[in-house]
Amino acid sequence: MNKSLKAPLLVSAILSSSFAFAGAAHGQAFYLQEQSTRGQGRAFSGEGADTGASSLWWNPAAIAGMERGEAVIGASAIIPKGDVVDNGTLIRRPTLPGGPVQTFQPVGGDRVSSDPINRGVVPSGAVAIPLNDRVAVGLAVTSPYSFTTEYNTTSWARYSALKTELRTIDIQPSIGIAVLDWLRVGGALNVEYTKAELGNALPNVLATLPDGYQRLKGDGWDLGWSAGVQLHNDWATVGISYKSRIKHNLKGSLEVGGLLGPLATQNRTIDGATATFYTPAQIIVAGRFRATDKLTLNAQAVRFTWADFDAIRLGAPINTAIPENYKNSFSLAGGFDYAATDRLTVRAGVQRGITPTQNGNRDARVPDANRWNYSIGGSYKVTPRLTLDAAGSYIDFANAPIDRRTAAYNGTILATPILTNGQVQNAKAFVASIGGRFSF
């Protein structure tokens, strides 16, 4: 093959993968909000305004003015369901010299891919310690962007996605200060480790040949920050916080294999491949309002700057940017806590989340859609120092098109356009969480 074609073919092969991390079935796009069992029970409707270590992820001011130390631990089992269905995806393979003129043909493969998002368990924990009656320090460990999607090699979506795996660990050291009896402020550093692997099939020039493949792996450490404020009086608390966007810098390897004929020279492993992308900032406004001695009402709005996830930029030797074209989005939630007895508190809530993915740019890696989150939960005080939490959620997703068009080897004589036409259908998720809080 002409050497001048090698770089364009490699770049366009990667572009055809529609590189994007897998979408969380219960947060927004690939964001996981399961960082508190207590919060899940009310559909995350008052976390930025609540107090204690359980709310540390949402607002570092939550630990200001604590009288005792507190440790929190929890785990959420996530069971996503749904189908990614082909509605007529087409592929046009290149016309070879002396061969017949190629036209668009069905992509072939299994028409329905069921439950491509894997089940999993998300752990979280936090601890906070008062230094005096106004200042406290804390540490939260969470996993805000983590899970796996997998498609069979025979799936109709194989050229967009086979396996996408993302794991993050966010370590958030924090400080909270009660400046006045009614005013609390806080700040935090977010130290985030990210590890990713993704792969997809690559079409060979003839439909009779088996598919090739590519896999991209990488990891890295990155920094962000959080800041917040809470306003308190006898019957209400209002919290406002900001979590910065984080620029992720991953370094790893790219492996391309299984290509035959005129594409065979593209089979290679590139060590030291790099990728950068942004996860969004969050602007959180929350309120908790004591309606009676036993009933507290909660509300929370979150604005996500998902437009920061506009592209994934690949460094040398690939040197290209893959457009993602996410839009800013938001979630709204309302719920309540009811002290049924001195030991038992029950809670419930509803959340509406709007997807940042857009029609015309949605692919099989992130089969995300607008959703409703219905949650219930409760807490039981076993001893004056130990409280157990439990929660369950049902998330219902709207149907949405899978319609991001791609082209393998674009800009070369072997260009292979793929007109994606699919839909995510019958998508839902069940989340069950259990946790505990211990004061000391």
Image (cartoon, grey):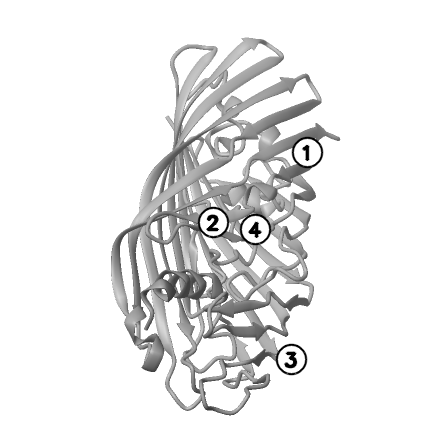
> Cα distance, mark 3 to mark 4?
27 Å
- Mark sitting earlier along the chain (2/3): 3
Image side of residue 270 versus residue 368, left or right: left
Q: Name the residue under label 2.
A: 312
Relative depth, front residue between 323 and 378: 323
Which amino acid type is shown beneath numbered disc 2? Ile
Relative depth, front residue between 19 and 375: 19
Between disc 2 and disc 3, the foreground one is: 2
Q: Mark 4 points at which residue?
A: 27
Where is residue 233? Give x, y as percent. Answer: 68, 16
Image side of residue 134 versus residue 141, left or right: right
> Cα distance, mark 2 to mark 3?
28 Å
Q: In the rendered view of the protein, which quadrant contains the N terminus?
A: bottom left
* Crowd band around label 1 with a 10 angstrom C-alpha radius: few (<14), some (14–19), many (20+): few
Q: Is residue 69 visible?
A: no
Between disc 3 and disc 4, the foreground one is: 3
Which amino acid type is shown beneath numbered disc 4? Gly
Q: Name the residue under label 3.
A: 87
Name the residue located 59 percent from the left edge and 83 percent from the top edge.
104
Name the residue located 43 percent from the left edge and 77 percent from the top edge.
203
Where is residue 68? Give x, y as percent. Answer: 42, 21
Q: Name the residue under label 1.
A: 294
Residue at far right of view: 291
- Mark sitting earlier along the chain (2/1): 1
- Mark sitting earlier along the chain (3/4): 4
Between disc 2 and disc 4, the foreground one is: 2
> Cα distance, mark 2 to mark 1?
49 Å
Relative depth, front residue between 437 and 292: 437
